[in-house]
Image (cartoon, grey):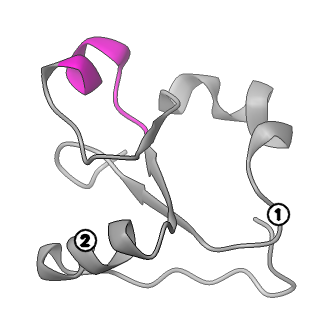
Amino acid sequence: MGKDKEASTDVEAKDIETLSKNKEFLLDVREEYEYQDGHIKGAVNLPLREILGKKDSLPKDKDIYVYCRSGHR
């Protein structure tokens, strides 16, 4: 969203710790109750159904790493 060229790249679970340590923007698009049950430390919760209405609050100057429960959202 914040890059000149939109691209999507899969990240493996083993890389999440490094992303978190580097303070990358981790976006959890699950519902709030799912987020409360457990999430990646430092991740921001914004349910998928709310993204369009709140897209201006997302960073435009860095990559956004999006995750959900199953990879289908």
- At x 22%, y 22%, the residue is 34
Q: Is residue 28 magenta?
A: no
Query: For numbered disc 1, what is the local secondary structure?
Result: loop
Q: Is 2 above or below relative to 28?
A: below
Judged left or right of residue 12, residue 5 is right
Q: Quadrant of the C terminus?
A: top left
Counting residues from the start of the chain, the first of labels 1 and 2 encountered is 2
**Secondary structure state at the residue bearing disc 2:** helix
Q: Is residue 23 left or right of residue 61?
A: left
Q: Residues within 10 Å of mark 2 (few under 14, many from 20)?
A: some
Which residue type does callout 1 highlight? Lys
42 to 38, vertically: above or below: below
In the picture of the structure, the residue carrying the numbered disc 1 is 60
Residue 56 picture location, percent across and down? 86, 40
Which residue corresponds to the image point at 17% horizontal and 48% vertical from the top-left? 70
Residue nearer the viewer, 8 or 33:
33
Q: Give the residue displayed 62% in from the left and 84% down from the top.
A: 7
Q: Residue at x 87, y 85 (%)?
A: 4
Q: Which residue is mark 2?
A: 16
Image vertical order of residue 10 relative to residue 47, above or below: below
Picture quadrant where residue 49 is located: top right
Residue range in magenta is: 29-36
